[in-house]
Image (tube, rainbow, N blue to C red):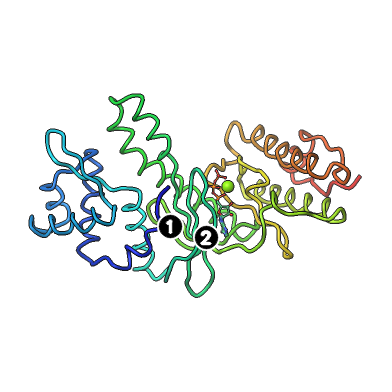
């Protein structure tokens, strides 16, 4: 698991961030960055680089390997530290609190500012990279470069999608994005998977979820990973989150993905609330969501 870097970030000095940025820069060209290159990219002299490397090694923000030469690379914690530092500099985030959720593909923390925020670090490519590296050493270099890239792309996609959806669709308000991280409004509520709806609430909540899917479609997006784990329910209604894999409604497969999303949602309601969930046809429903003719499930 990747550790919360908030404490380390508070202890770091400006030169430590120059060092980390220098290593980040060097990683565009090679997996392991030689100290001499770090000096060049971070504009710190050799002695300073050694001192800063020790500090960052102690905090597990960089790691070292010696093959033909001694090289350094960022850990995910080091990359987190750079993103968090950027948010702090821009005054997006004042502090980081407890974990809100640890997924296979992300770590989400409470963050503080003038409003309650959530800070999501994307981890796409990271687990993958580890498996691939074990199996096929010859691709290790390219795969390594790709975890930074894959995670950053996922964060950019999620942020752009949230910007395209908010406020027409009930999604967390996007606040900021840097590297592989996004900052968004913190949503209150419980995940649909953990909510115990009363019989009287079931159809209403199902309709709210479907209405948000219709609104997203009208805004040009299909979520493509809809499930009871990506919907919050509260007294105010529902919020749909976790959008990095969303596709445009122009996408060739968007109709199929929408239908699969509808099947996932319906399937969940049918399993958990068999007596209250009406018998519905996912294909017809997906069609109605897409052409904006959805007007409820009561039958
Ligand atoms: N804006 C938010 N406000 C409050 N909690 C959030 C917010 N975004 C995410 N979370 C919490 O963090 C958890 C993980 O977030 P998210 O679903 O976006 O990523 P993920 O779970 O890694 O993706 P996947 O669904 O692929 O596992 C959520 O289940 C939720 O509990
Ligand atoms: Mg999720």
Q: Which mark is residue 174?
A: 2
Q: Position of residue 275 (x, y in %)?
A: 88, 43
Looking at the image, which residue is at 49% across and 59% down?
109
Q: Residues within 10 Å of mark 2 (few under 14, many from 20)?
A: many
Q: Position of residue 296 (x, y in %)?
A: 83, 49
Picture quadrant where residue 185 is located? bottom right
Horizontal and vertical percent for residue 208? 75, 54
| Labelled disc at residue 177 | 1
Decide which of 26, 12 is in the foreground and name it: 12
Q: Is residue 60 left or right of residue 181?
A: left
Residue 171, compared with residue 129, is above or below; it is below
- Label 1, residues with CA under 10 Å away: few <14, some 14-19, many ≥20: many
For the residues marked 1 and 2, what is the alpha-carbon distance in whole angstroms?
A: 8 Å
Q: Quadrant of the C terminus?
A: top right
25 left or right of 96 in image: left
Q: Quadrant of residue 286?
A: top right
Q: Are marks 1 and 2 in contact (CB under 8 Å)?
A: yes
Q: Position of residue 248 (x, y in %)?
A: 57, 41
């Amino acid at each position: 698991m990747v550790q919360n870097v908030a404490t380390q970030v508070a202890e770091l000095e400006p030169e430590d961030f120059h060092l980390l940025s220098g290593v980040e820069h060097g990683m565009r060209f090679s997996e392991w960055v030689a100290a001499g290159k770090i000096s060049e990219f971070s504009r710190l002299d050799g002695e300073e680089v050694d001192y800063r490397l020790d500090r960052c090694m102690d905090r597990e923000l960089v790691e070292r390997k010696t093959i033909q030469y001694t090289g350094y690379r960022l850990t995910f914690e080091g990359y987190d530290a750079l993103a968090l530092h950027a948010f702090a500099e821009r005054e997006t985030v004042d502090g980081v609190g407890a974990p809100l959720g640890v997924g296979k593909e992300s770590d989400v923390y409470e963050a503080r500012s003038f409003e309650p925020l959530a800070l999501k670090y994307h981890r796409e490519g990271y687990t993958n990279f580890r498996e691939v590296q074990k199996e096929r050493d010859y691709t290790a270099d390219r795969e390594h470069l790709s975890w930074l890239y894959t995670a950053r792309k996922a964060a950019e996609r999620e942020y752009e999608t949230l910007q395209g959806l908010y406020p027409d669709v009930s999604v967390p308000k996007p606040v900021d994005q840097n590297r592989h991280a996004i900052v968004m409004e913190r949503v209150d509520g419980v995940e649909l998977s953990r909510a115990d709806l009363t019989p009287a609430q079931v159809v209403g909540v199902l309709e709210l979820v479907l209405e948000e899917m219709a609104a997203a479609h009208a805004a040009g997006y299909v979520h493509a990973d809809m499930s009871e784990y990506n919907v919050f329910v509260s007294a105010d209604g529902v919020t749909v989150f976790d959008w990095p894999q969303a596709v445009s409604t122009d996408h060739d497969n968007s109709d199929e993905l929408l239908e699969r999303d509808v099947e996932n949602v319906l399937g969940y309601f049918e399993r958990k609330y068999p007596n209250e969930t009406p018998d519905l046809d996912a294909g017809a429903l997906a069609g109605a969501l897409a052409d904006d003719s959805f007007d409820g499930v009561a039958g």
